[in-house]
Image (tube, rainbow, N blue to C red):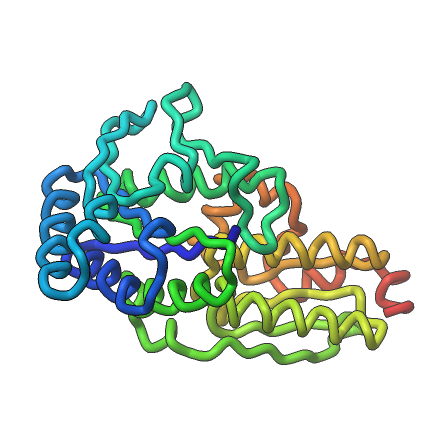
Amino acid sequence: METAIGVFDSHDKAGEALRELLRQSVPRESIVFLTRSENEAMTVAQELSAYADGFVNRGFLAELTALTPLMIPGMGQVYTLGLGANALLGLVSSGTGFALDKAASRDVGVPETGHENENAALFQKILKGGRSLVVVRTQWHEIATVASGVLVRLGNDTSERARVKTQTATRQADGITVLDVRGRITLGEGSAILRKSISDLLQTGNKWIVLNLYEVDYVDTSGVGELVRTHATLRKQGGQLKLVNVHKTLMDLLRMTCLHRVFDIQKDEESAIKSFGRAARATA
């Protein structure tokens, strides 16, 4: 399964995103809306119902607009809209709060261990901050890519920087390969570009890599999964990955998911290069 996530400060934008997903033929059973505000959930449901009039059969959206209250330990009441709110997100009322069903869901690039806790922590942090979520989970990559485009465009991060196409550039520093990344590492293009860049470097014998994230302004859960994949791939090849210039939002996510203990995160590029040791630099 692939996941696309949109974060919203207003019900207007969240409703617009839901309507656009339907216009783009994203299956209603793949869409879930989550908020801590009952009024917001009811307003979005009413707007979707009004949108359905004269456009689609009312029964088509009846399940999508059905309001379901869920009690999440440690957070309180959460309201969801969507046919598959429980099944898609695996929400459970246990002591752990949010938990993603291990058998039913997998993010592209996210390994089995840590995946459930990663999304759980991220969702809880967003909802506790008073914002709402639109989540699309699907087994079809094409649908996930379309959904991601809609949610990125209409979500909170609409700055010019967010619309910069993901780019990478390679340079050598004291025998170590530095991969500069610019833009977003997200489901679809961003993750694919990073994966191809790493593959190209390995094919040319470059396996000691510093990943410079200075110009990366956003990394979603699939992007984090791609970083984990990169780390694992280089280790299998006898190489090593160092991260530098990790922005605060990404660092917070890595700490919440305990992935900061997996990655070697250095304070700057010079420290990262030195940390490889002379032997690595000599054979790089």
Q: Quadrant of the C terminus?
A: bottom right
Residue displayed at 47% across by 47% down? 253
Residue displayed at 47% across by 68% down? 184
User: How far across and how far down the image is residue 5, in percent?
Assistant: 38, 55
Please give the count of numbered marks on the rendered protein.
0
User: How far across and how far down the image is residue 162, in percent?
Assistant: 38, 72
Describe residue 200's horizontal placement relative to residue 259 as left or right. right
Residue displayed at 32% across by 45% down? 126
Describe residue 280's horizontal placement relative to residue 154 as left or right. right
The one nearer the camera, 211 or 205, is 205
User: How far across and how far down the image is residue 190, in percent?
Assistant: 53, 69
Describe residue 231's horizontal placement relative to residue 88 as left or right. right
**Does residue 209 lie above or below 71 as drawn?**
below
The one nearer the camera, 266 or 11, is 11
Describe residue 159's horizontal placement relative to residue 43 as left or right. right
Residue displayed at 43% across by 38% down? 121
**Does residue 104 lie above or below 191 as drawn?**
above
Q: Quadrant of residue 174?
A: bottom right
The one nearer the camera, 197 or 143, is 143
**Does residue 151 lie above or below 106 as drawn?**
below
Q: Quadrant of residue 218?
A: bottom left
The one nearer the camera, 99 or 51, is 51
User: How far across and how far down the image is residue 74, in percent?
Assistant: 33, 25
